[in-house]
Image (cartoon, rainbow, N blue to C red):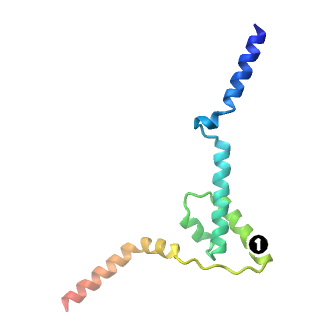
Amino acid sequence: MSGYLKILLSLSLLGLGGCERLGLADPVKEAAAREADARATGSACRHAGRGIEDCYALNPDAARAAVYAGWKEMNDYMRENNIAEIKPNASASSSAESSASGSEHGATSASASASASAK
């Protein structure tokens, strides 16, 4: 009976080893992937010449500590190797600012149009 139990236990352990194939997520791997993504985001922000605060604002879901670590690594690397910043073609920070100041702009344009129609 103990031989049967050992075989059953070993088969069940082998079956659990393939949980990834069943679509069950591994939380450790997911956490490592999220941290790696946040570090890559931080280093990309630094390479694009964005400040760390802008990087946080543009990526609110990323872990701040990992974003900062990536930003700092890239900053050190760029200083050591005398690498210049690359300016992004599409300014995501200006679109974030415009959406934040959209209500102010709307109020300003509404008052401007009202004064223009009064003349």
Image-based side of 62 in relation to 81, left or right: left
State whether residue 39 is above or below residue 90: above
Residue drawn where x is 72% and y is 73% of the image: 75
Q: Circle 1 sits on which residue?
A: 76
Q: Nearer the viewer, residue 9 or 45?
A: 9
| Residue that sits furthest to the right in the current view | 80
Q: Secondary structure at mark 1?
A: helix
Q: Nearer the viewer, residue 42 or 2?
A: 2
Residue drawn where x is 71% and y is 22% of the image: 11
Q: Residues within 10 Å of mark 1 (few under 14, many from 20)?
A: few
Q: Quadrant of residue 108?
A: bottom left
Quarter holding the C terminus is bottom left
| Residue that sits furthest to the top in the current view | 1
Quarter holding the N terminus is top right
Q: Amino acid at mark 1?
A: Asp
State whether residue 88 is above or below residue 32: below
